[in-house]
Image: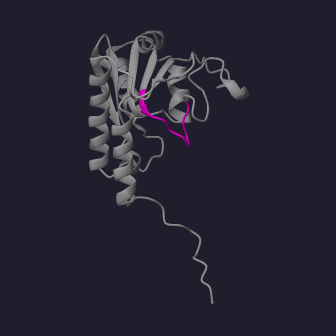
């Protein structure tokens, strides 16, 4: 289950590009809300069944990444429908996630544990990526000897590089404007006499 880092020059199906555009739209909503612009959609049988965007600043909760937001929508919806834990797991195994940036280690671990079928992402996440950039948590036999433990990790198919330039552009826009919610440095500046 290795990551297929596909060059941006290769063609993706109109369906894949359409779903990634919806994830980009979610990332733009995050940017408009002064959040790191990452967005996603979850698809089942060719239909979007959930969407999410980063909400870490808004909620003051570092775990509120786009993927976690979308997963929570589905879990709540399916629990209200009366699905058992086994039925929820079965539903996730039929879903695909489209996200603008490679899932971080936390999100990749969660996606592996819930048993999502596949993940399509835009740009790589060179600092925190859990689908090949730092760790390969999408692989059921993770390299580097790191595993998710006895959590029932299933692994998932992963494909990156889809509309990566659009995703990078949004991230660049965010960081160029400065993050108004970033913590202030604790160290005082050293002045030279």
Rendered view: 44 above or below 60:
above
In the displayed structure image, the side of residue 148 where residue 180 appears, left or right: left
Looking at this view, is 70 or 130 the one in front?
A: 130
Q: For the N terminus, give its image quadrant.
A: top right
Looking at this view, is 168 or 131 the one in front?
A: 168
x 56%, y 32%: residue: 130
In the displayed structure image, the side of residue 12 where residue 159 appears, left or right: right
**Quarter residue 105 falls in:** top right
Rendered view: 117 above or below 193:
above
Looking at this view, is 148 or 132 the one in front?
A: 132
Where's residue 81, x and y in %? 32, 15
What is the magenta range?
Answer: 121-130
What colour scheme has been applied to the protein in the rendered image?
one colour
x 39%, y 58%: residue: 179
Rendered view: 187 above or below 147:
below
x 52%, y 29%: residue: 108
Residue 181 drawn in magenta: no
Where's residue 17, x and y in %? 30, 24
């Amino acid at each position: 289950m290795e990551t297929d880092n596909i060059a941006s020059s290769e063609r993706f199906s109109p369906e894949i590009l359409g779903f990634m555009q919806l994830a980009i739209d979610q990332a733009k909503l995050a940017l408009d809300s002064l959040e790191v612009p990452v967005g996603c959609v979850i698809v089942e049988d060719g239909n979007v069944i959930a969407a999410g965007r980063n909400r870490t600043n808004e909620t003051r909760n570092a775990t509120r990444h786009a993927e976690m937001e979308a997963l929570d929508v589905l879990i709540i919806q399916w629990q209200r429908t009366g699905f058992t834990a086994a039925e929820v797991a079965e539903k996730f195994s039929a879903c695909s996630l489209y996200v603008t940036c490679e899932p971080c280690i936390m999100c990749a671990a969660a996606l592996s544990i819930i048993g999502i079928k596949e993940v399509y992402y835009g740009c790589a996440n060179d600092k925190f990526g859990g689908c090949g950039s730092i760790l390969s948590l999408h692989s059921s036999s993770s390299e580097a000897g790191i595993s998710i433990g006895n959590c029932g990790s299933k692994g998932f198919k992963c494909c990156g590089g889809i509309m990566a330039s659009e995703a990078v552009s949004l991230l660049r826009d965010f960081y160029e404007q400065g993050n108004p919610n970033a913590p202030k440095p604790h160290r005082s500046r050293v002045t030279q006499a």
